[in-house]
Image: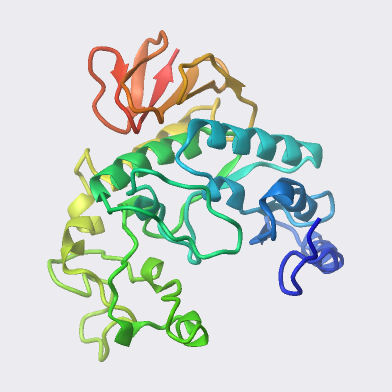
Amino acid sequence: MAQRRPHWDRDEVHDIYRAWRKVADEFDGDRAFVAEAWSDTWADTPERLAAYVRPGGLHTAFNFDFLMAGWDAKDLRAVIDDSLAMLRGVGAPATWVLSNHDVMRHTSRYARKTVARWVPNERYQPQGPVDLDLGIRRARAAALLMLALPGGAYIYQGDELGLPQVEDLPESVLQDPIWERSGNTDRGRDGCRVPLPWSGQTAPFGFSPEGASAEPWLPQPANWSERSVEAQTGDETSMLELYRTALRLRSENSALGDGTMTWLDAPAGVLAFRRGPGFACVVNLSTEAQPLPEHTTIPLASGPVADGLLAPDHAVWLEV
């Protein structure tokens, strides 16, 4: 195993976390610690993640392995299997996450034809031209995949709006210290930290109160009026309504949330699994339309389903 960096994933921190857990357990009511734990190397990440949520440690941890996976069925399945096995081994619930405040928004990561695995603790450098329509399709499918998996899910602010990474912020507005520390060679994380659009047709799109004396710390793109909460509310085809419907169905269906899952036979490039009696999720990561397994109804789909075929980069929830 490679020597660990002094600032990342040190064994010594677990004594501190166990002390914190003892303090939290002294109080009544629900309290939960969430670890934002990174490891230096991909190979030992699942084991290192599990160490944070052992009995007496923190309650849950962000699953960055899932976030770092490429848009590839084999890669994602391996991450899901490894994560479930490692966390089950210490009696901790699984968690899943697609984006956070330190990484490129997954709508933009998925907006390239080829989505490579992300190397831990390195700045993600996507390759190829940006196709945000492709990124949105994949982000919608990824949302249904994540919310159908066993355990909990973390949704980074703006994921539910389908916000892309703002990759063209002027250098004059960059705030992340990484920009200065790198000698103005690494633009840092500001592109995923642009304030959310809530309403209206012009910036700051309801983010600041009326009469505010200053603009938000980072400028919003002009076309974010189309991505605001106001613009998406009530639009059944929007990312926001997809998330709202998925979260409602998830809360209503006892097969979802905690529990187990069973992989189903599926064509190459397709992920298909069952959750409890009566529910299945299918995600098509291949380049061809694929037939759906036998089912009674489709409670939710990331896009239109025609003639029993699931188009590439789409996902469905099924009653089976």
Residue at 42% over, 41% down? 143
Question: Considering depth in this image, is 152 or 75 the residue closer to the camera?
Answer: 75
Quarter-of-image position of residue 77: top right
Considering only vertical position in the picture, is 221 above or below 65?
below
The reply, left or right, for residue 163 in relation to residue 263 is left
Question: Considering depth in this image, is 32 or 242 the residue closer to the camera?
Answer: 242
Residue 89, percent from left and from top: 80, 37
Please say whether residue 251 is visible from this viewpoint. Answer: no
Residue 178, percent from left and from top: 50, 80
The reply, left or right, for residue 106 in relation to residue 166 is right
Please say whether residue 276 is visible from this viewpoint. Answer: yes
Residue 189, percent from left and from top: 44, 71
Residue at 78% over, 60% down? 2
Residue 285, percent from left and from top: 41, 31
Q: Tally the marks.
A: 0
Residue at 23% over, 18% down? 306
Residue at 17% over, 62% down? 225
Q: Which residue lies furthest to the bottom in this view?
A: 213
Q: Residue furthest front?
A: 128
Tell me how the rendering is colored: rainbow
Question: Considering depth in this image, is 16 or 212 the residue closer to the camera?
Answer: 16
